[in-house]
Structures are given as structure tokens and as C-alpha cells.
Image (cartoon, rainbow, N blue to C red):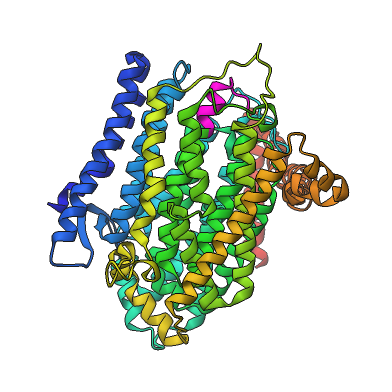
Amino acid sequence: MFELVKLVPLLPLIGFLIIGLFGSKIKNEKIIGSLGSLTVLSSFFILCYLLVKFLGSETSGPVLIPVYDWINVGNLNIGFSYQVDQLSLLFGLIITGVGSLIHIYSMGYMHGDKSYFRFFAYLNLFIFMMLNLVLADNFVLTFLGWEGVGLCSYLLIGFWYDKKFDGVRITWTGDAANKAFIVNRIGDFGFLVGMFLVFITFGSLSYTEVNSMAAGGYIGYYNTSIMTAISLVFFLGCTGKSAQLPLAVWLPDAMAGPTPVSALIHAATMVTAGIFLIARNSVIFALAPTTMTIILVVGIITAFTAASVGLVQNDFKKVLAYSTVSQLGFMFAALGAGAFTAGVFHVMTHAFFKGLLFLGAGSVIHAMSDEQNIKLMGGLKKYMPKTYFTFLIATLAIAGIPFFSGFFSKDEILYSVFVNNGILPWAILAISALFTAFYMFRLLYLVFHGEERFNHSKFHPHESPSTMTIPLIILAVLSAIGGFLGVPEALGSWISEHPNILHNYLAPIFSNANKVLTTHNDIVHHSHLFEIVLMIVSVCIALIGIYFARKFYYLDKDWKTPRKLVSSSPGIYKMLLNKYKIDEFYFTFIVDPIVLASRNFFWKVLDIKIIDGIINGTANTTAIFAQSLKKLQTGIVQNYAVLMALGIVIILGAFILF
């Protein structure tokens, strides 16, 4: 029965081939959109069936499904095989479930686009690659999907290649696509090096073999420095794909692509690939405490930095982009704290509410004729009631208001960080959560409440069609109730002894990693009362952010207080508005020097004068020598006879003398 997993990635691939090859001839948007959506939806239903069968089976271990022998070179044997277990099923369901909703949404959003079929072909190809990434039973197949989603990201970000995009040195969407592609290549180099180190250390690239060997030798068989090296280079790959500092600069500019792309790739699926890689290899990371600390620090810094930048952004999608980077920082902080389940839990809830936020943004942008400046909106609630209420639910969820999905996952992260790493990391994340609540409700009030600040003669806002609003409603329901899969014992112990369904579900995946962590670290146990107090504090922090957002941007119609804050601290405001000038720093100290050196030295000196000079000089020398030799070939027989005689005389003379 688990052989059906082969169909899961195959169906989107078939959709890609049909739409890509024949879409221009089909031309009917409904047929193209329905085909693209049904292939992904069918994969979702197959995964649901497999989940039921897997939970009902006697084994809790992974089920390996070989497709065909792929690479057999010496001791390197790599099969094209899929691994069915708790983690792959969960990520597969997120990808196909949210992905199918975004496909349906795109049928309305992309209506009338001249490259409608190309868009759905790219979406299907992306789903195929992403499913290979999470279903793979070895590093190489994961890397195939890893590179594949990078390619699809490039294609989808630059989909509107003929449109301009207002960003730092981004003059058109092709530049934004190039930026995403190039920055991710830096991280991909880390993934490659990690695979080499894994094969050298373990002699295998199979997840089950590597993790079982690592778990079997955690007492001290494997050198900690080797585990640190492997985990660090893998984490470099994760920082690129999951937009963590210092490689987070590509994601905000990636908003140049169509909004469904932002929802699918940059909120729900691709950017969580780094979380998946760490979760899949949790034992290796648990064996490297130095790496775990680095992951925690990077996650906290990224969460705070991105959240602070989001406070002042005025582009609708840019606010959500920096919010995504910040939430990814929360996930990495959870992984760094050893709370692997909490990190994966936040991946799931984030897919619900952030996917909904992006699709809600797309609904507004669609209704406002592609306008994205939130200061030119306002009062859209009465024009777009369905979009507003679904967007409100997602905003409450990401702010961490009880009992929406984000409340459960974010609280578990904050609690884990506090317990395992102390009050300072918790405080920084708590401030980031405060910023999150503030900028999200600032966004809500500026877009849907207050005075109508748009030009009525130019803009005619209206509710989106049902193909767009139905996915919004479904995601809103998931954003509201999805968190109950991870109810902590402090709140649900009266219902069940183990109320955290997701924790129990993922326990076999992280059991070995947790054994390693408990062996090397002292586990501090706190009472349920302490956890509840911490929850109350985090909720109060969120409410403070909402209060100030309401005070500044809803009750204060002229935004007097924000204007005073800006005028009193112009330096801080400009720093945040310019995103800490991280892009400018990279251009000044990395990009521009490389370009300058490439043009003035590597091209004009090394390439043209030295390399070309050596090659051209060799050719010229050969030509000159040939010109000299050709004079010996006169075509006159007498000359040849004289030369022969001279040669005979020289040879005889040599024999006589020597």
C-alpha cells in the first residue's frame, strides 16, 4: 500500500509536462488551472490515505520505497527511493495541502495573464521538486529537490520579467530572481560539502543508516569536531534556503514575483526546507552543541532584526516578507534550543497563517489594481468583508492570541528557549513577538480600517472571486484551530495525559536526538504553573503590541504619535526603513569589489593580457616560426639537391670527427 507514495510526486510532474508542453495549445484557463490544481490535490489525498495506513500499522519506523537504482560507483550506492515516516508525511501534507489551495487561488488571481499556462507549469514543477526534497530517503535525492526548488524559485520570482520592481538596486524582476538564485548557491555549497563529509565519516548517504550510526555512537564514538563540521556546513545551506542572516537578503526582494508565489514558496514550503533538513538530521545536530548554540543565536538575531525592520515598511508584501524572515528565526531558535518538535510545529502553523496573509494581500492587491503601498489604502473592510475577516484571523494567529494556531506554536518555542537557554534569549524573542503583534495590526488598521486614502477615480476595490476567497476561508479555519494539534500539557492535562498530539506523533523521529541532548545536558523541569505564567506574559506582550498599533494607527487618525517618534529619532527610523543597509553593505564590501576586480583585473589583466596573451603569443610564435620554415620549401629541385648534399657532408663529417 505504501507503494502509492510513488504517485505523490509523479502526479505534479505529469501536470507540469502536460501544461508545459500543450498549455499554449489548450488556451482554456479553466482546463489549465483545474489540471494543475487536481494533480496536487490528488497527491494530498494519497498522502492522507498513507497517513491513516501508517498510523494504523504496527511499525513506527520509516518505510523505504525504492523506485530504481540510481548511482552505483564503487562503495557509493544511492537509490532513487522515498521514505515514508512521520516527518515526510507531515511536510508532504503541508506542501500538497497548502499548495493545492494556492493553485486554486491562482486560477482567479492569474486570470487574463498572457503566460497563464507557464505559471501553472512552474507551480507543478515546484511541487514535484519540493516533494522529492521531503520524501527522499537519502541526502542526494534531497539535494536534487533542493536545487530543483531553487530553480523553480528563480523562474517564479522572475515570472513577470518585463515588470519593474522598486527595491535596492533591483531594476526589474529578473534581477530579483538572479539575487535569490545567486545567494542560495552560497548555501548550496555548504550542503554539498556536508554530503562529502557525511560519506567520508559514515560511508553512506542514506538517512536511516547515517542517523542510526550517529545515534549508536553518541556516547563518544564519533569525534565532536567532525559532527560540528558536518552540522555547520549543513546549517550554511539552511541559512540560504530558509533566509537566515547573513543570507536573508534575497527573500524580501523575492516579493517581485506574483503573490501566490510568495504564499507558496516564501511562506509555506521552500523556505522551510532548512528546518526540514535539520529535523531530518536531528541526531547529527544534537551531537554538535556548538552548532546548536550558533543556530540559536542566528535564529534570535534574525527574528529580532527582521521584526524591527517590519515595523516601518509601507509595501504590503514587504511587511509580510520581513515577517516571514522573523518567523523563520523563531523556528531556528527552537531547533537551536533542542525543541525540534516546536520548530516543526511552527512550520505547520506558519504555513496556515502566513499563507493566508499572503493570499489576503494578493486579494487586496488584485482589488486595488496592483497597488501595494498601504498608506494609499484604508477603509477596505466594507468593500472586502471576506478578505478582511480571514486576514484578521491570520493576524490574530501570528500575534499569538489565544487560542489561535500561532499561540500554541510560538508559546512552545518561547517556553523551550527560556527553559533550555535562559532569560536573555527568551527576552529578545519576546521583544520580537511584541514587534510582530505591532506591525501586523498596524498593517491591518492601515489597510482595512480608517479613512479611505486611495483615489476613487483610479481604484475601485471589490471582493475577490470565489476561487480566491474559498482558499482564504479554508486557511482561516486552519489558522484558527490548527494549533490544537499541539496543546501543551499545562493546558490540556485535564483532557488527556498526553494532549500534545503532534509531540506524540513526532516522538519517534526525535527520540534519538532527545537521548543525546539529555545525556549531555541537565534537563530542568518546571511546573505547569510556571509554563502558564510564561504563557500569560507572552500574551500580555502581544496585547501591548496590539494596543500601541491601535492607538497609533486606528484611534489617531493623523498618526501624530508615529510622526513624533520618527521626528524625534530620525536616525533609527531611517536605519529601519533602509533595512539596516544590509544590502548596501553587501554591495559596497562584497558585490562591487568583486565586480570591479573582475572587470579591471580578472578580465582586462588576467584574462586578456595574461591568459589570452600566453595563448595568442604561442600562436604568434608558431606562425612566425612557420613563416621562417616555409622559405625552405622553394619548389626548385636544384635547391633540394644542394641541401641533400650539404646534409650528407655534415653527417660524414660528424662520423669522421666523433
Q: Is residue 363 magenta?
A: yes
Q: Quadrant of residue 368?
A: top right
Residue shown at the point (23%, 64%) measured from the top left: 62
Viewer-nearest residue: 260 or 634: 260
Q: Indicate yes or no whether the magenta region holds residue 588.
A: no
Q: Residue at x 28, y 64 (%)?
A: 505
Residue under the image location 46 percent in, 66 percent down:
412
Left or right, 420 with reference to 641: left
Give the camera-side residue of 285 and 233. 285
- Does the rendering let one see residue 150? no
| Position of residue 369 measured from the top left corner of the image (x, y, whole percent) | 58, 19
Q: Residue furthest front?
A: 555
Depth check: 197 or 358 in front?
358
* Whole-percent x, y for residue 572 in the image: 81, 52
Work out whether residue 218 can be spotted: yes
Which x, y percent locates residue 497? Answer: 27, 73
Who is closer to the viewer here, 314 or 285?
314
The reply, left or right, for residue 342 in relation to residue 13 is right
**Quadrant the C terminus occupies:** bottom right
Is 108 above or below relative to 489? above
Q: Which residues are magenta?
A: 361-371
Residue 560 spot, x, y in % from top left: 80, 40
Number of numbered discs overlaid on the protein picture? 0
